[in-house]
Image: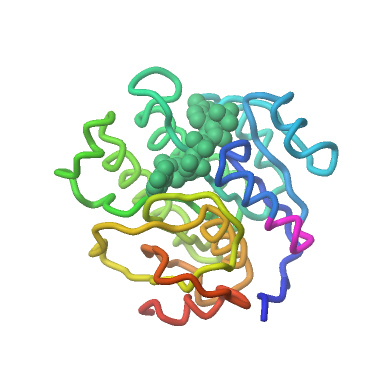
């Protein structure tokens, strides 16, 4: 059975126009959660989401833009991701500094929960993906900041470290979850990553957890809540 939404707060989605971010927005709307998206391109966000979601335009480099976006939100989910070696879409600017700035402005604004899309292998400096601007190392630094800031009393976080991302509908695979960054490879649908981060808003066992996740086998799921039971306390 699908997870029953008991969450009433407003959620800001950063990176909402990306492939995973779009699924985060879709799954929030599926559960009737009010959504606000933060995008650098208003037209793109409007084209994707129409008038049904609130759109705040701004840059992840600007603390004041972010402050406008997080104001009044109860939770933030970040699906931000870099796309070039250098400049404003680099791992340093987006995966590390952008996420850290988002965390700081969210905490200042009284946001209570932070969800983050990270990656398998973030603890491995020697991973070949680090040839791309040290992307995994930058994500690790951002993760550490999330854990530090959002483990304060009355706050919480959920960090999902997916394997390689694929497109496709949610709830079509049995998942394998693990902790300690021990998995070397595997795939997962972006839609399932989104689903995990969305239900983490109201599933207690998802709070203050960092975990890896990949597909185990094709098998329709009635919900994903049970995977949080498999994580150590
Ligand atoms: N690809 C994989 O196999 C894989 C595996 C594990 C983890 N991940 C991670 O999972 C996350 C989501 O991946 P994805 O494939 O969904 O990513 P994506 O489609 O590339 O989306 C990335 C999002 O980040 C936004 N963004 C990029 N640079 C920005 C900037 N300077 N300012 C503001 N927003 C910016 C993009 O905005 P625009 O839409 O405006 O460009 C987009 O919304 C990423 O962190 C990625 O590194 C990916």
In-front residue for pair 19/69: 19
When asked about the image quadrant of residue 28, the answer is bottom right
Which quadrant: the N terminus? bottom right
Q: Is residue 54 visible?
A: yes
In the rendered image, residue 224, in percent from the top left (x then y), is placed at: 56, 73
In-front residue for pair 88/193: 193
Measured along the vertical axis of the image, is residue 57 above or below residue 155?
A: above
Measured along the vertical axis of the image, is residue 86 above or below residue 176?
A: above
When asked about the image quadrant of residue 175, the answer is bottom left
Measured along the vertical axis of the image, is residue 201 above or below residue 139?
A: below
Is residue 86 toward the left or the right of residue 199 in the image?
A: left
Q: Residue furthest front?
A: 218
Is residue 212 toward the left or the right of residue 206 in the image?
A: left
In reply to whether residue 31 is colored magenta, the answer given is yes
Residue at coordinates 48% horizontally, 61% vertically from top-left? 158
Q: Residue furthest left?
A: 126
In the rendered image, residue 214, in percent from the top left (x then y), is placed at: 39, 63
Q: Residue furthest top?
A: 87
Measured along the vertical axis of the image, is residue 65 above or below residue 23?
A: above
What is the magenta range?
27-33
In the rendered image, residue 59, in percent from the top left (x then y), is placed at: 57, 25
Residue at coordinates 40% horizontally, 37% vertically from top-left? 95
Q: Residue furthest right?
A: 51
In reply to whether residue 211 is colored magenta, the answer given is no
In the rendered image, residue 201, in percent from the top left (x then y), is placed at: 61, 65
When asked about the image quadrant of residue 231, the answer is bottom left
In-front residue for pair 196/153: 196
Residue at coordinates 51% horizontally, 63% vertically from top-left? 156
Q: Is residue 60 visible?
A: no
The tally of labels here is 0
């Amino acid at each position: 059975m699908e997870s029953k939404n008991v969450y009433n707060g407003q959620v800001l989605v950063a990176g909402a126009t990306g492939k995973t971010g779009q699924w985060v927005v879709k799954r929030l709307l599926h559960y009737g959660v009010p959504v606000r998206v933060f995008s650098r391109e208003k037209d793109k966000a409007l084209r994707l989401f129409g008038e049904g979601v609130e759109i705040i335009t701004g840059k992840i480099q600007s603390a004041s833009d972010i402050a406008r976006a997080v104001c009044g939100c109860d939770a933030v989910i970040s699906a931000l991701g870099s796309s070039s070696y250098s400049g404003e879409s680099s791992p340093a600017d987006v995966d590390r500094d952008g996420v850290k700035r988002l965390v700081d402005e969210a905490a200042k604004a009284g946001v209570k929960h932070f969800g983050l899309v990270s990656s398998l292998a973030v603890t491995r400096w020697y991973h070949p993906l680090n040839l791309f601007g040290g992307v995994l190392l930058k994500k690790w630094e951002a993760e550490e900041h999330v854990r530090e800031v959002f483990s304060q009393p009355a706050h919480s976080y959920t960090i999902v470290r997916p394997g390689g991302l694929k497109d496709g509908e949610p709830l079509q695979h049995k998942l394998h979850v693990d902790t300690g960054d021990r998995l070397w490879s595997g795939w997962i649908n972006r839609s399932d990553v989104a689903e995990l981060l969305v239900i983490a808003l109201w599933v207690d066992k998802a709070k203050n957890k960092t975990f890896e996740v990949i597909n185990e086998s094709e098998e329709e799921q009635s919900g994903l809540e049970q995977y949080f039971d498999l994580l150590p306390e």
